[in-house]
Image (cartoon, grey):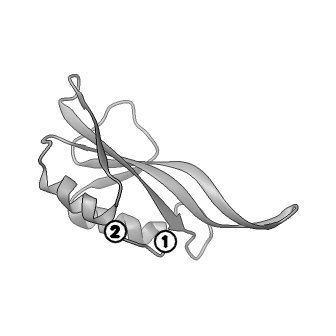
Amino acid sequence: MEFDSYKDFKQAIEAIGFEVILGVKDTMSANTAYLTLNSAKKIGSDNFKFVIGYSYTLVASVEDADSKLIQQLSEVIDSIEFVNYSDASHLYSFSGSIYLPCGNGGQAWE
């Protein structure tokens, strides 16, 4: 699924039932999607470049491996896959990547 900006993506993920956190936390919480910025896509030449979008890694944590949240998330993110089960937090982690174009302000969170 394609999105016009980070805000559109965040609204879609929250509508599924995930809390969206840009960055990482020390402990993982259930039904939470953590986004980390991978890279910026730039166009231009020499020292004159524009950022047109960003690539993110998404890690989603749920209490049940067969969660409907993961099924719905897989419709939004094409390449989501199981990562691991944490004995400490008792959560299943799934990971995927997504590219989001810049919003109106041009920042990674817009």
**Mark 2 neighbour class, 10 Å CA radius: few under 14, some 14 to 19, many 20 or more:** some
Closest to the observer, 25 or 60: 60
**Mark 1 neighbour class, 10 Å CA radius: few under 14, some 14 to 19, many 20 or more:** many
Q: Which mark is residue 21?
A: none
What residue is shown at x 11% (from left), y 47% (from top)?
66
Identify residue for label 1: 5
Q: Is residue 110 visible?
A: no
Q: Is residue 3 visible?
A: yes
Determine whether the residue tagged by mark 2 lies in a helix, strand or loop. Answer: helix
* Three-letter residue code for mark 1: Ser
The answer to which quarter of the image holds residue 44 is bottom right
The answer to which quarter of the image holds residue 11 is bottom left
Determine whether the residue tagged by mark 1 lies in a helix, strand or loop. Answer: loop
What residue is shown at x 28% (from left), y 62% (from top)?
14
Identify residue for label 2: 11
Q: Quadrant of the N terminus?
A: bottom left
What residue is shown at x 38% (from left), y 64% (from top)?
10
Tell me, yes or no, whether the two marked residues, 1 and 2, touch with CB atoms within 8 Å: no
Q: Position of residue 21 (x, y in %)?
A: 39, 50
Q: Is residue 3 left or right of residue 89?
A: right
The answer to which quarter of the image holds residue 17 is bottom left
Q: Position of residue 55 (x, y in %)?
A: 53, 56
* Three-letter residue code for mark 2: Gln
Q: Position of residue 91 (x, y in %)?
A: 20, 35
What residue is shown at x 29% (from left), y 53% (from top)?
19
In the image as oriented, which residue stretches furthest toward the top? Answer: 88
Above or below residue 74? Residue 33 is above
1 or 2: tag closer to the N-terminus: 1
